[in-house]
Amino acid sequence: MKKILDLIAGELKPVFAECGYDQSYAKVNLSNRPDLCEYQCNGAMAAAKKYKKKPIDIANEVVEKASANPVFSEITAVMPGFINIRLNGEWLAGYLNGMCSQDKLGIEEPEKPETIIVDYGGANVAKPLHVGHLRAAIIGESVKRMGKFLGHHVIGDVHLGDWGLQMGLIIEELRDRRPDLPYFDPDFKGEYPQEPPFTISELEEIYPAASAKSKEDTEAGHAFKERAQTATFQLQNGYPPYRAIWKHIMNVSLADLKKNYDSLDVHFDLWKGESDAQPYIPGLINDLIAKGLAYESQGALVVDIAEETDAKELPPCIIRKSDGAALYATSDLATIVEREQDFHPDHYIYVVDKRQELHFTQVFRVAKKAGIVAPERKMDFLGFGTMNGRDGKPYKTREGGVMRLEKLIAEVNDAAYQKIMENRTVSEEEAKETAKIVGLSALKYGDLSNQAAKDYVFDIDRFTSFEGNTGPYILYTIVRIKSILSKNGGLSENAKILPAVTEAERALQLEITKYNEAVNAAFDELAPHKICQYVYDLSNACNRFYHDTKIITEENEQQKESWLALVRLAKDVLETCINLLGIQAPDRM
């Protein structure tokens, strides 16, 4: 099905043409004055300049010819040249019934589906997920789900940090603790053990200890850091004992990361890391040199990225440091080389902290300048702000440390459980299971309802509230509709939505029709908050209709069936939309 705005514009286009004006002026928008009309066409004002006429004269011409169209119950021209529109109730009901009968409630498949890489997650191995990883996971998952739902081939890649200095630090700390291990015996000739020499808990304690040791401004601290740098270099050059330790680190870390991401209902198609890009780096550097793009500056190898249209000066992209080491930019460019070879993407989307914007500007420009990707390739940086506590600083534990993600999830679930138990209508066991669903909705919706680039305050009390613009409020609306449908025992197959008979019903019908537009706009603009705003508005419309309408006790069976069909469609739209946010609804709350 086409978006309702496009269908209305389709009715006006031939009218504009018949009046002698270009059809492009027939664009229709939602009215910003719903008290006056439902939709608005402002094309007469844009056309006035070209055709040297008064806007109101053009608007009157169009309205005169369009007034007999059965799609409109009312179409009027008002000063200085607006065309105000109200829809015919029968036609509106027909559109809604069409949604009920369509796959995906009428979302159109794209003419040319794109292959899209969404790079999100970005966790480091050997470290637990903490609140700083939350936004990349939640926003990236939503963008991926939207793209897939709209019919694109979307590939989500976690892109792990698995190849840097932290590996050398872990290796050397392990040597200090367990020098007897075969990895540190230069004369060892056998097979290295299959079992890792540490658990995830031990590994998560080893890394911070090693990191702290390397930062000590002492002779021992400096020596330890040098050992770690040497071990990192040896690992990256294929030294077998260290590769064996690295595989243990990866296996233990991945199992833990997958468990934590699963608890967020976040799932990746690829579990690639920086290490996967390493084989492509030598060829990348040689290519940049051969094309005359990379040159030496103060011992480092750099590529200029500045363009004449830049508003501010942008520094060159460093490809190789003076000591020969590759950098994040090198690794990210090599990853693009790998992705081009494996997937030929039409579109790249990177969901990363907004402070990385310069880095990705450099990477994208080098990729296009070097011909790694075509000049017209879409490459988007979706930068997000920080999640802060009430003090306005990045969210931490009460003790002031970085909060682990699983602890944050547990706190939110507990807050949701307390709210459910206040108005308990379910067993304690069911309340605990429901709290996990409600808690996750509070966490995700609290994040996604903000524009990604903005910092926001994480307020556990507000986010878990069953009132206001929150995840639990949206779920409560869905559960309420499920209850209405359950009490009625379902709907007949022939149930049809009829023209609205009340203001609240009409408002709900109009709100439902915005679904197609809202989902497409949210993905086109990489803006999950637009879906949040839509489901909040739709939930409000549902609840107003519920309060104004005695659905279950209605004696006219045809009218009752119509209302039930309407709220069922509203429920289906709400559930579809929250699924795109990575949220599910329980059956009871």
Image (spheres, grey):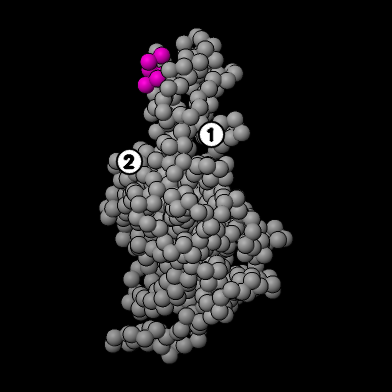
Q: Is residue 31 visible?
A: yes
Judged from this view, the residue extending furthest toward the top is 52
Image quadrant containing the C terminus = bottom right
- Decide which of 206, 324 is in the foreground and name it: 206
Image quadrant containing the N terminus = top left
Is residue 17 a member of the stretch shown in magenta?
yes
* Callout 2 secondary element: loop
Judged from this view, the residue extending furthest toward the front is 555
Instruction: Provide residue 101's location: percent of width, then percent of height.
Output: 34, 49
Q: Residue at x 53, y 34 (%)?
A: 38
N-terminal of the pair, mark 2 or mark 1, is: 1
- Decide which of 124, 264 is in the foreground and name it: 264
Looking at the rendered structure, the kind of residue marked 2 is Ala
Looking at the rendered structure, the kind of residue marked 1 is Glu
Instruction: Provide residue 334's location: percent of width, then percent of height.
Output: 36, 54
In magenta, the rendered stretch is 14-19
> Which residue is disc 1 drawn over?
38
Instruction: Find residue 3 and report its image quarter.
Output: top left
- Up-down relation of residue 130 to residue 281 (above or below): below
> Which residue is disc 2 drawn over?
374
